[in-house]
Image (cartoon, rainbow, N blue to C red):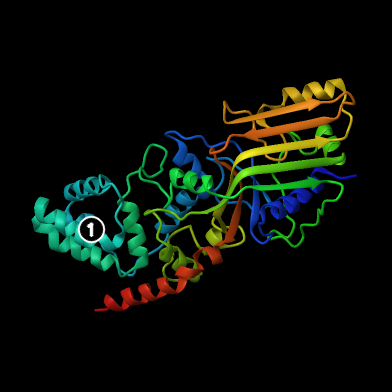
Amino acid sequence: MSTFLDLQDGWFNGFLQGLGQSQDSFQIIQPAPPIASGDAANATFWAYYNNIPPFSLTQQFVASGGNQFYSDYRSLMSALVPSRTIDVKADIGAETFAEWQAYVLKQPTFPSMNQIPTMFRNWAMIYAPSVANIGSSDYAAILLDPIATAQNELTLIYTDEKGLPLNFDWSLKYSDMVTQLNNSPSRSFSFSSQTMDSDVSSSWTGGSNSGFFGLWGGSSSTSTLSEKFASSNVNVNASFDNILVYSNTPGAWYYSSAMGLAYANQTGNPWSPQSSINWNNTFGTNGNMQRFSANLVIASGMSISVTSDASYSTLDQQTIQSSGSAGFWPFYSGSSGSSSTNTATFNENGQLTITTSSVKGVPIVLGANVLPVAEYVGHSVEAGRSLYALAESFYVD
């Protein structure tokens, strides 16, 4: 008799095959509510990239829970020591520094660090000419050191009452994603628990899969009804008007060379010996930055039909129908206004059919491709080492 874990593992294999993904990196994300347009669309969308994925084939996603990329990264930068301390604020004065910050934050596009020395000089020649030279020289020197550059990027960002930067962003926005999604191909596939392959031992987690719901959102996978559903013959017919694999990178708050340099050196420079944050509790076995969502698998125009040939009693039927507001397996995409619908019906034999649909053009995140930190920062490691070495030699008296 199949358990819910068997069903979830089998679904993982069927799902990644149906969507053309790889067992070496794919992770199912549940629940999967629509991301409607509006003021909060960017923040909701970016939350999927900002969340540090667990070591599991299924992620039970909570936008404000678990490890967060930005906050963990900010803490990491506080534990690193640049090759030389450059205090721009002290050199140009606190009042001038505040005015300069305000000017930077008013720009329509947040400037890169490469632009800052010239940008500061041009601004200061008008508003603070006495510190134009020292300020631009400080910023030019910071550019030689990836740690100093990364820390300076963070000083140019004001935070809100929740600790998130006011200009917290990723390179591509919700509107960019929707445009690409609407031009992406369709996809359809079928799944049957009778013929499924539930062996996930060759996957990127080696078979680790936890944190998933049962029959409906929020239910236990070991509940009586969940186990009854899992042990029945379950069939899924899934079609999507659009499927998009969408990559994104952090915005100006993130400096890849600095994190690459920190990862490349387990002890010594650039780690501060006084900090409680170190390589092991950041990147090690129990670290908070072991893996990242490199891209998301996003759908629109979803049409899902799930059938179970078990016979459910009248009481069971009532329980299932009254509990489905949070959505049903496998996506747990509940009814959300006009964006999505979700129903459970039963035939005369008490057999269950779940129907889930969403409108075209409204994105739904179904999964992610997860990269270990070594791959995520690997391209920046050698560049970071070279810059740090150059900075050290530059400042030798």
Task: From the image, tell me which residue sits under label 1.
Answer: 88
Q: Is residue 218 visible?
A: no
x and y, in percent, of residue 307 in the image: 81, 36
Residue 133 coordinates in the image, percent (x, y): 13, 63
Quadrant location, the N terminus = top right
Q: Is residue 73 above or below residue 141?
A: above
Labels in figure, total: 1
Amino acid, disc 1:
Val
> Does 337 sit above or below residue 177?
above
Question: Label 1 neighbourhood size at 10 Å, few (<14), some (14-19), many (20+)?
Answer: some
The C terminus appears in which quarter of the rendering? bottom left
Which sits in the foreground, 126 or 139?
126
28 relative to 172 in the view: left or right:
right
Q: Residue at x 11, y 50 (%)?
A: 127
286 relative to 28, above or below:
below
The residue sitting at 37% across, 39% down in the picture is 160
**Residue 134 sits in which quadrant?**
bottom left
What kind of element bears circle 1? Answer: helix
Residue 258, image x and y in percent?
A: 41, 64
The answer to whether one can see residue 49 in this image is: yes
Q: Is residue 165 left or right of residue 134?
A: right
Residue 78 picture quarter: bottom left
Residue 111 spot, x, y in % from top left: 29, 55
